[in-house]
Image (tube, rainbow, N blue to C red):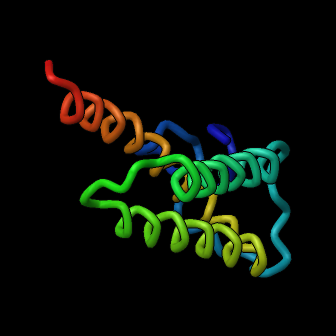
Amino acid sequence: MKDTFMFPTYLGGSGDIFLLFKDFPYLDFPSGYKYYFTGTMGFHLANCIHHLTTTEKSNDYFEMIVHHLVTLYLYGYSYMIHACGGGVIAVLHDIADIFISNARIWAETEY
C-alpha cells in the first residue's frame, strides 16, 4: 500500500489523503488492498473469538469485548460501502498496536 494513490506522504507513501474518496463509490483499489484489509479484519475477528472463549475475566474484560465488536463493525461497514479509507486506518491501528502490545507486556509481567 506504500505506493498507492491514497497513502499519504507523511506515512511513507507517495499519494494524498484527499484522494481517498475520489470517484467514490467506484474506486479502483490497488492490488493487494483487499487482501490486506480482509486479512486484518480476520485478525481482529480471531482476537474477538479468542477473547470471548479463552481469556480470564480481568478488570477490562467487557471494555475489550466492546472494543472488538466495534472494530469488527467498522471493518465490515467500511468494506460494505466500498470505502478505501479503512485501509489507511488499518495501517495506523497496526502501527499503534505495536506500542500497545509492548505496554501490555510490561504492565502484566512482574518485571
**Quarter holding residue 82:** bottom right
**Quarter holding residue 20:** bottom right
Report the quarter where the N terminus lies: top right
Decide if residue 100 is on the left or right side of residue 56: left
Report the quarter where the C terminus lies: top left
Q: Position of residue 29 (x, y in %)?
A: 81, 58
Q: Residue furthest top?
A: 111
- Residue in the foreground of this view, choosing between 4 and 38: 38
Q: Position of residue 88 (x, y in %)?
A: 56, 55
Q: Is residue 83 above or below residue 58?
A: below
Q: Position of residue 55 (x, y in %)?
A: 46, 48
Q: Is residue 56 above or below residue 75?
A: above
Decide if residue 43 is on the left or right side of residue 54: right
Q: Residue at x 52, y 53 (%)?
A: 51
Q: Is residue 63 above or below residue 55?
A: below
**Quarter holding residue 69:** bottom right
> Is residue 88 shown to the viewer in this render?
no
